[in-house]
Image (spheres, rainbow, N blue to C red):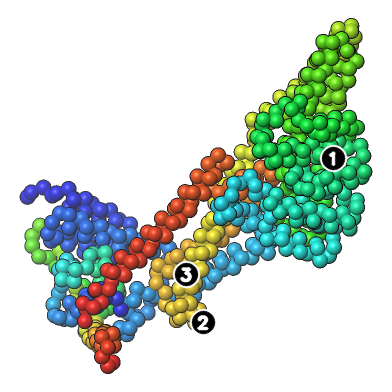
Amino acid sequence: MSPQTLRVLERFAQRPAAWRYGYELSRETGLKSGTLYPILMRLAKYSLLETKWVTTEDGVPPRHTYRLTPNGIEVVRTSVAGTRSGWKVRQRALSGGAA
Amino acid sequence: MTPKAVPRRVASLLLRSVIKITPRDAIAWGQAMLSELHHIEGDWAALVWAIGGASVLAKHALLSAVIPRGNRPAVASGGELFTKEGPMRKTILAAAGACAVASLLFFLAPAFRQAFRVSLAQWNCVLHVMPVYVTLPYREPGLEALARQVEQKHDAEGLAFVAVRQRHWDAPESARLADEAIRLDPKLTWVYAIVALRNPLLSEIDLWVPKLEQWDPQNALPYLITAESIDIHQVARDKVRHWNLNRAEDESPAWQNAMAAAFQSPKLDTYCDRVRDLDRRVLLRYGFGDPYQAVDIGCEYGLPSSAAWDSSRYAESLLESGQILEARGDRKGALEKYWAVARFGQMAGSAGRFMMSQSLQDAYKRLATLSQREGNKQQAELYAYLVGKVHQAEEERTSLLQRDTGGAVSRWNAGVVRVSGLMMLFSGGLALICVSSVIAKGGLLRPGTLRVSKVSVTLGIGSAAGLLLSTAMLYVTYRPYAEILRAYLRDGDQSRIEELTWFLGYAQLPLGMDDSNQLNFVFYFWFGVTAMCAIALLLAVLRYLQNRPRATATT
């Protein structure tokens, strides 16, 4: 899993029930649109992310919003936890500590 | 409502434009990026956003054009979810493999192997960093292998074939092979003449010339070899510039004697026909498929330029002597001098190159003038007619060179062959990289379960298709030249051999280069390679430095 994907998932995992905007995710993760949207598209393609169009104010086009599906929440929990523990083990090994 | 700033308008326009070519399943995502534009702070930030989004959509459009969408299974596990990879489809693997196999099958055809060899000739002067003109005929690994083979078999003709193809810095080896060939078959004594003309500094020439005179006593060639050898030794010994020896009167008595003997000889045989026949026999016997070895540039014009130049200088001196004798009233002596030039010029014919043409015309003019003075009008008219014939032949030759029609077609075909060869190398290299990356990821044993990125799939298919296309293009373009060579080797048909010679000459020039700027090209080529390597190294270092702190910051 790429660090960028992990970063996006971590954002979703913080508030799993909330709907998020693309630009908002971009600012929070520091990812450019060219990196963020392929990740979102892939997540949505595998039904881990649900999407919805919402109207925010008059005269402005509706916005696309995203939220993890229940299946997505489950996958993200295992993936993020696994990756984090893996990193910690690696970091300890690199710093000379016991693995 | 305030008017939108230009960057924001450009951003909006860009995304709207790309959405038009986006595949249907990604249009909603394009609209999503477009709608977010209204909420982005800063016009330039909006433009950057749009550029990123447009690149994503464009990539989707490109991939959907190359790889048709299939039914993809839903993925449940997180491990295989986020890696930009999908299962490699058997049809894709089969298509790419078929293209690669079809390309390789071309190598079964001898004509294609020839074509491939010709397409690689352009690298000779780049990789060896040598001027093009010394590469024909050049010694290459195939010739080395043939040399070993013919030596083991004690094949006299094979040895002679290799001997005349040695480069000038391999002259001693050339002499050794020629000696061995003639020891095995004395009928090949003429090979001494070819080797001597190509290597005038060889010390063995002094031993060879008497043998040549004995073997072919009426031929002028051994005397021309002697004269050339004297000339070149003087240049090497006294550091005299060759163009300073422009007057025949300044030459040594030995040179004068050799040229006098040459001009008195009853015939001039440059043994080009014998060389061609020998080449054909050896090439067919050993199935040696290098067209550069089959087309002997050295024999194309008959005498080497040095011998032709010597002849021209000596002819001029004879004409001058004749005029002096004429002025003294020695008509018979003058006539002999003019006749010697006319006879040698006729004998040399096309072998004497353009250098003898002017001397021949001058000799006929003088003979015509002498006949006119004697009142022999009929003979004077005959000489005048001969002047016209020689002049006409020279005009035709010049006109043929200027028209250069065969050269233009051959130049184009050689260009196509060179491009095809480069495309083949590039596509083949790319395909190898793709296959290596796939193997490194998990092997090719179970292609159904193999997962590769879309980029790898696209590059793999593109390179395989490119390989097939360039292979076919190379074969189709070279095929007529293979036929010319086949007709020449089997039947001795020389009618189109000049066309092949033009083609092979152009094919060995690196792409985008002509004879005039070859050294610059080599310099720019290696400069480009070095610069690209430096840039690649710089990018690798930057990427490494960029990634290192991020990895530590995550934990």
Kindly identify which numbered label has been placed on residue B445. Answer: 2
Packing grade of label 2 (10 A; few <14, some 14-19, many >=20) is few
Kindly identify which numbered label has been placed on residue B434. Answer: 3
Ranked by sequence position, the earlier of labels 2 and 3 is 3
Q: Secondary structure at mark 2?
A: loop
**Could you say which is closer to the camera, residue B183 or residue B109?**
B183
Q: Chain of mark 1?
A: B
Q: Amino acid at mark 3?
A: Cys
Q: Pointer 1: what residue?
A: B222
Q: Secondary structure at mark 3?
A: helix
Q: How many marks?
A: 3
Residue B207 lies, with reference to residue B467, above or below; the image says: above
Q: Residue at x 80, y 56 (%)?
A: B177
Packing grade of label 1 (10 A; few <14, some 14-19, many >=20) is many
Q: Chain of mark 3?
A: B
Give the CA separation, mark 3 to mark 1. Answer: 61 Å
> Residue A38 at x, y = what percent?
28, 69
